[in-house]
Amino acid sequence: MRSIALAAALAAFGRLELVASTPTPTEPEQPNKRASLPTVTASGNAFWTGNTRFYIRGIDYQPGGSSAMKDPLADETVCQRDIAEFKKLGINTVRVYITDNSANHDTCMNALADAGIYAIIDANNPLFSINRADPGPSYNTEYLQSVFATIDEFIKYDNLLAFFSGNEVINDQVQSTLSARYVKATTRDMRQYISSRGYRKVPVGYSAADVQDNRMQLAQYMNCGSDDERSDFFAFNDYSWCNTDFQVSGWDQKVKNFTGYGLPIFLSEYGCTTNGRDFGEIAALMSSEMTSVYSGGLLYEYAFEDNGFGIVKIPSVESTTVNEQSDFAKFAKALADNPAPSGNGGASSTTTSAACPTKDANWLVDSTLLPAIPDGAKAFMSSGAGAGPGLKGSGSQNAAGTSTGDATPGSGTVTATASPSATSSKSAAGPTTVGPVDKAPFILTALVVLLTMTGTLLL
Ligand SMILES: *[C@@H]1O[C@H](CO)[C@@H](O)[C@H](O)[C@H]1NC(C)=O
């Protein structure tokens, strides 16, 4: 009874959450009971299904690589063939880099769900993406329309785990750090779009390249500033294990450095091939040495390409069978031998932000201000993005409708939602530029009210 009364009290104060929004709720959302798989939420520095900690035990999935520009989740023959292999592996997540937002994904997404597998979707693709060589013009209305259409297409599936707002846009060329502002603006816009459209709060974050020189600065940058500008998680690609161990790989340092980071972290790619692979990474990721900071990772990769990382060879695109390579059984064994630990793994229940990094030789960003959302893209928040452009045409990198000027921190805060069920939104309507300073009194008031009510209810 007590919990019911408290839930009702919290529900009554739901509108405050819209004003004092944080990147992640402090309590895990309850899973959707109707779902074939419980939905995954980000809370504190971890992922959860209800009150159960969720670890990503997955693989990167893009047969043909990025040059093929083919969506494996839009082709039933392809996905059914591969899902049979995923079941043998015992994975719980796939990441797909390139999807077609004009295609239907019901068959493949539902087949994944039936196999107990979640999907992490990159919201951009080679045609619709930020151009690291000239990022400003590529952050435009047409780009965001495609990104938002990808959200519309995938967010309806309960086994959609998260969206990436970019992949390795910033690389080992220091000049590319200047594109970080545009990636971060995209993250902000995606999170605002998800809330504005009344969608489930699917986590949004960036997948960083394995760059030693500015890994920490980039991570801090993605988790600094006002709440609307911060990510829901951080992920990076890591190729340093190379059949060694926790110390030799330097993973011990990557735990130390990211301790207290304040958001969920996982490896969006791992699997160095230099010394062959026994996938000792999995034992490390599932051990108490890492679980308080990391939430698992994704092996790079499923399909064998010229770069030699894949664990199955696919004779032809439409082939109905694959040839498992020797790493296939080794990876399956490593997963089976190292199940997800029980308990909370030492996760922290609160999120914290980081200080914004300052400009130096490895990090050229000299402002904490982000570009404002392009004027033409603002209407998508209330009207929706419309039909996705798919993987055709010349893409958005040189399209018109770019950003004009910097945003006021807090301008990505959601003040009204499109969902008819969010009846409290009318009372939450207010200026669209509620900044962190304006928020403080609301947070304090909410806290005092909440503590008072909780105290009362507990008596
Ligand atoms: C850990 O942080 C220190 C200090 O910022 C940095 O010098 C070092 O390269 C980092 N190590 C790793 C593995 O990221």
Image: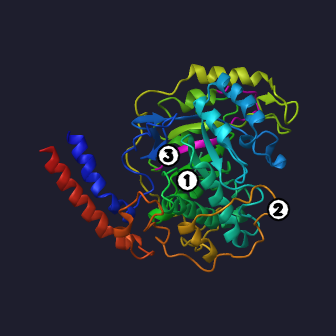
Task: Give the amino acid at mark 3.
Answer: Pro
Camera-side mark, 1 or 2: 2
On screen, residue 356 versus residue 120, left or right, reads left
Label 3 sits on a secondary structure element that is loop
Asked whether the viewer can see residue 361, the reply is: no
Extreme residue toward the bottom, this view: 404
Residue under label 1, please give it. Answer: 204
Residue drawn at 84 percent across, 34 percent down: 318
Looking at the picture, which amino acid does disc 2 mark? Gly
Helix, strand or loop for disc 1: strand
How far is the residue under mark 3 from the one under mark 2?
36 Å
Say which of marks 1 and 3 sits in front: 1
The residues colored magenta run 263-279
Disc on the earlier residue, 3 or 2: 3
Write the residue at 76% across / 33% down: 273
Relative to 352, 387 lies left or right:
right
Residue drawn where x is 37% and y is 66% of the image = 19
Residue 393 bears which disc, if any? 2
Does the magenta portion include 331?
no
